[in-house]
Amino acid sequence: MRSTGPSRRAALLGAAGAFVVGSLSGCARDPAPGVDRLVIATAGRLPGQEVVTVETGASHDNLILLDRGDADLGLANLDSILDTDIAVEGSRVSAVGRLYDSFVHLVVTADSPIRSLGDIEGARVSMGTVNSGTEFTAGQILDVLDVRPEELRLDQADSAAALASGEIDAMFSLTGLPTPAIADLAEERPLRLVDLSDAAHSMASTYPEAYFPATIPATTYTGIPACPTMSIPNLLLCREELPDELVRRITAAMYTGAGRLAEQRPEAAQINVRTGISTGIVPLHPGAEQWYRENKPA
């Protein structure tokens, strides 16, 4: 029996809602064709269309709903996508575009003895929530590097609180920059990011399409110096059967609204046409392709 979730004509945006929905509300004076009900994870409206908001646990939850047909749009990390059948030829899921890159954080208190990934062996470590991108990516890293901590499943806010209270020794986070929970905690007490340069090179060698060596800049968090780590592209995915014109408008909204939305969500500053088409092996939806062709950068 099919799960009772959002309707087949639902649009699940997850974290992407902040980027897309705020722009969609002003991108057209008439309803987009073919869809009269959108279920979206953040506030916003399209003229003439019902909008219902929903929440998910992030990347893997979004992929599950897309695969089941219970969502039309979803944001997911590329490593999570490559681990599913969504990326294979003939899938009914395609890409609207690449939005921004998520960065792996391994956070400890400044006085922690943990200096490398191997030091978390046997330590109490938050892996993020169940079915989140953080949980998946952290699990991939630990498997490849053969490190076995005591794993806990906590969301970002609870992870930060547990780290501050000493209930855990470290926390993983996979997000755009900056991560609000980490930024807030860094204002309250000294923190440190663990150098993941060796892990980044190992992950890039093992999964070259998904992981890329990167650095979290020194200006990201109060009192925390620049730290080597790895980044993972985030894609906005959609059901292949969404009307081309609707997807074209969504694609347009992503880029025309990114500057304004970056004032509220810093990750939006990374959205640009040049990188938007870099979706790896996930094909672009025809509606998105049309918009990119019409708006090639000079």
Image: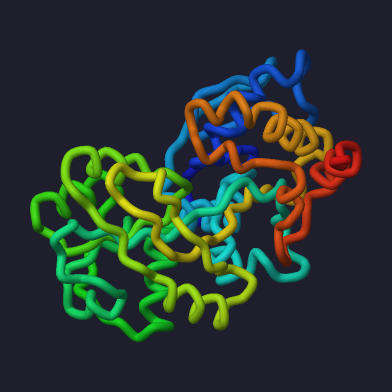
Query: Who is closer to the viewer here, 11 or 290?
Result: 290
Q: Quadrant of residue 138?
A: bottom left
Q: Which quarter of the rendering shows the C terminus?
A: top right
| Left or right for 90, reference 184 | right
Q: Is residue 131 visible?
A: no
The tally of labels here is: 0
Q: Is residue 110 above or below residue 160?
A: below
Residue at image coords 63%, 31%: 258
Q: Could you tell me which residue is drawn at 76 percent across and 48 percent down?
A: 274
Front-most of residues 170 and 20: 170
188 and 166: which one is in front?
188
Residue 249's image quarter?
top right
Tell me where residue 21 sits by quadrant.
top right
Q: Position of residue 133 (x, y in %)?
A: 44, 58
- Name the residue furthest bottom: 146
The answer to whether one can see residue 10 in this image is yes
> Quick one: 235 or 298, which is closer to the camera?
298
Q: Looking at the image, which residue is at 36% across and 68% down?
A: 195
Relative placement, left or right, of 296 versus 153 is right
Q: Position of residue 217 (x, y in %)?
A: 45, 51
Above/below status of 7 relative to 79: above
x and y, in percent, of residue 156 in the image: 30, 48
| Residue 249 as seen in the image, left or right of residue 222 | right
Q: Position of residue 269 (x, y in %)?
A: 59, 37
Residue located at (64% from left, 71% from top): 209
For the rendered model, the colour scheme is rainbow
